[in-house]
Image: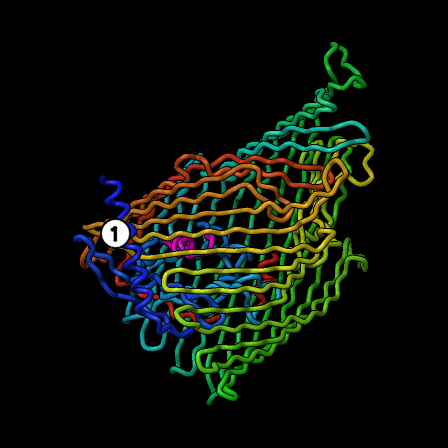
Amino acid sequence: MKTMRLAALMAAMMMTMMSFAQQNDSLSTDTTMWFNQTQELSGIVVKGRLPKTRVKGDAMRTTVAGTILEKAGTVSDALSKIPSLEAERDGGVKVQGRGDAEVYINGRRVQDMKELSRLRSDQIQHVDVVQNPGARYAASVKAVVRITLKKAQGEGLSFQNSTQFMYQYGGSLNDNFTANYRTGGLDVTGSFWVGTYNHWKSLQVNDMLYYVGPDQVTGHSTQEITHPWHAWSPQLQLNYMVNENHTFGAYYKFDRTPSSETKGDYLTDMFENGILSERSASYIWQEQSVKKHIFNAYYNGKVGHLGIDLNIDGLFDDTKTPGRTTEQTIDYSSSAQPMANGQSSMVNRIIESNTNSANNFWASKLIFSYPILKGNLSVGGEYSYNHRTDAYTFQASDYVPVKATDTEINEKSAAAFVEYGRQFGKVFAQTGLRYEHLTNDYFNFGKREDEVCRNYGDWFPTATLSAPIGKMQLSLSYRRDIQRPAYSSLTSSTMYVNRYTYQSGNPYLKPTYTHSLVLNAAYQWANLTVEYGRMKNSETMSTEPFPGSEDPLVSLVRPINSADDYNQFELSLSARPTIGCWHPMWYAFTVFQNYKTPTANGSMKTLNDPYVTLVWNNDIELPHSFRLSANAQWASKGDYNNFSITAQRFNLTLGVQRDFNLRRLGQLTLDVRCVDIFNTNKTDAVIYGIRELSTANSGRRTFLIDLVWKFNEARSKYRGSGAGAKQKARM
């Protein structure tokens, strides 16, 4: 009987929420509305104060201020609770179906994604998710996330300190201290972050399958990798608002990673027609030392009706990566010559390597905007230059088919765009056109290699149309974009992994071109997104016989372009009501495709099984400033690009938060959570190709403790937007 009453009560709640939807139909494309109506059901209050997601011009806007989302913890935590977004602490931000997003905070391009874990969610006013960016953004930008912080309040000195502890297979600790001083139009913010990381470990099982003539070869390997590292990073930014029409500022950040080690044990058994032929045990050590300088200066203002946005950026880094691999191989094949004691032959091998890379990057961006014909016209340009050096040397105790390299890349990129947007009653329309020209001069040991130099010139049209239709808001957008290979994918260096595997880049890689069409629909607390994409020259990883090697057991792993164009169709649906103190969020995403790939047996296979992700997040507000969270995510088997996901995946995260009012000493927030409680967030997949690779990663249960102290808190008003964003990301 209790179950029936509960079901009836839940149904009544949902009907009540739907009745709210019918009573509120005045939704403009430029206004985010909150609903604070209240109904009582058998003594239970259902309050409709919702963190709405709305169509806002070219974006889907989610309001954070005044909602449960501002209690999420870090900015990364808040983003991970927004439909279609995936955000990891100390990691990037992805938009489902679009990939990595370019992130802006108050108009400034975020260069280091760790910044999203150092800012708090209660500083956010709203978040815009742009799935088809307009012409003002680089054509290689797949998606944009614009974060607007709350308007700065008050003057004087304020502080904030955030400490985080993580435990997985070991413990990690980091701390970020921020001080802000504001007086009149001057705003100065300084911060210092320091961290030591020892919690991460990868436990992976790989199986390789391929054929050498009529013989079937399989390789079974297990690997255990740890990645301890420590780093520190000071940051300073200055903003000065002369008046409402003129603002300028500068930003500087220094990243220093004195030591970042990668230590791995690899065990590999090779079988020919099911019979053990070789066994290899490898220990790999690599240490990376990084120095990076990031600089931005900007001016944002108006002269009459003319808007001006100027940005100058610099990025200078230097990375040194020495490495050492020790390996022991035992040959069990019938052709092997036994040792004097009658045992199978054994070979010991040592490879020492060293990689030095550096970037010297400058970029500038200038945008003018002017009101014309009841709309807004924007024209602008962007220029960037990068000088990159990459040298790889090695010493081996035995012959390996690897060559030393000393490459130099000089890359120049210039772009110009025009964009016009106008409101026609309730309908908003925007169209744009962007031209990008890129030249890339490639040298190895001082000699120009013409066959891998590049000279591209491309046009990229964009268009957006949004309008309310009845009680629903709709937005339709089109874009042609490009994804240029990362510098690491273009290198000609070949790196030794173990006796059977080498890894390299591919200087002949082509850019990936995509035509995408996106439809967004918003109805009260429900949202729907439909996307179609046509991909050309998609980049993927391939495992193939090592060129020129007489040993068929040796493989080369490198990026290649797909041979055929293919289609992807994506569908997502989300709902975020509020029922009393309960704030649930349901999200479903599925992708369909027709990706064609070769297989190990020589046939072609079409990867077209749908891949589905379901998310159910719950936040519950309790008395005495307590909050509980329970977030579940399930992913199905299915296909994505040349990956075939072969096992379901489940992740349950539980957490509790508590705010403490310290009166004159400010406020303290404690956040404790456990990620992947059941250790079921695993990944099993098959990567198809001439040589098929099956891989399995175990789940990683993680414990997190955050402690945040705020005293007389203030927020920066920095407005720089950055230039050359995607070129910097490729580094």
Residue at x 66% of width, y 68% of height: 413
Q: In this rendering, would 528 be left or right of 559?
A: left
Whether residue 685 is visible here, answered yes or no, is yes
Is 201 located above or below residue 485 in the figure?
Answer: above
- Res 381 → quadrant: bottom right
Amino acid at the residue labelled 1? Glu
Q: Quadrant of residue 653?
A: top left
> Percent position (x, y) of residue 152?
33, 70
Occupied quadrant, residue 278: top right
Q: Secondary structure at mark 1?
A: strand
Q: Position of residue 598 (x, y in %)?
A: 73, 43
**Image position of 457 (left or right of 144):** right
Instruction: Estimate the x, y position of residue 256 in percent, counting from the top left.
Output: 50, 52
Mark 1 sits on what residue? 621
Q: Nearer the viewer, residue 519 or 646?
A: 519
Q: Is residue 414 depicted above or below 643 in this figure?
A: below
Residue found at the very far top of the displayed protein: 341
Is residue 656 part of the magenta span, yes or no?
A: no
**Pick the front one: 613 or 100:** 613
Magenta residue span: 74-87
The residue located at (72%, 70%) in the rendering is 457
Looking at the image, how many numbered discs can be counted on the residues?
Answer: 1
Residue placed most toward the observer, 15 or 461:
15
Q: Quadrant location of the C terminus? A: bottom right
Q: Residue at x 74, y 53 (%)?
A: 507
How far across and how far down the image is residue 311, in percent? 53, 73
Left or right of residue 238, residue 611 in this image: right
